[in-house]
Image (cartoon, grey):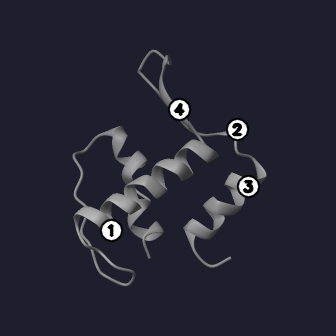
Amino acid sequence: METLIDYLRAWEAQRPDQILFRFVDVEGRELEHYTYQSFAERTRELAAYLFAEAALRPGDRALLVYPRDWRWSRHSSPAPASG
């Protein structure tokens, strides 16, 4: 395996229902979580969006800017996933 996306695909196949990310508030209450499968699916959806809406192609460079917030992680892998 060579890229983070390669690992994500392998982990999705090996443990689709295992929780990858769990976000909690200051009291420890869960706000949101992603399994390996749900995170990989979201990554593919966002990568497809970048191809369709931003006309990106494999090898293109892109700058993705996010607010300082825990929610950035759900958007952090589409660019590598799109090539």
Of tags 3 and 1, the one toward the viewer is 1
Name the foreground residue: 50 vs 64.
50
1 or 4: tag closer to the N-terminus: 4
| Location of mark 4 (residue) | 33
Q: Secondary structure at mark 2?
A: loop
Which quadrant holds the N terminus? bottom right
How far apart marks 3 and 1 lie (CA) works out to 24 Å
State which quadrant residue 6 falls in.
bottom right
Question: Which amino acid does the dot numbered 3 rest on?
Answer: Ala
3 or 1: tag closer to the N-terminus: 3
* Lateral position of residue 13 relative to residue 23, left or right: right
How far apart marks 1 and 4 lie (CA) works out to 26 Å
Other residues around mark 1 within 10 Å, as few (<14) / some (14–19) / many (≥20): some
Of tags 4 and 2, the one toward the viewer is 2
Which quadrant holds the C terminus? bottom left
Q: Please name the residue shown 22% across and 58% down the image.
A: 65
How far apart marks 4 and 2 lie (CA) works out to 11 Å
Question: Which amino acid does the dot numbered 4 rest on?
Answer: His
| Location of mark 1 (residue) | 51
Mark on residue 13?
Answer: 3
Question: Which amino acid does the dot numbered 1 rest on?
Answer: Phe
| Location of mark 2 (residue) | 17
Residue 3: x and y in percent read 57, 74
Marks 3 and 4: in contact by CB < 8 Å?
A: no
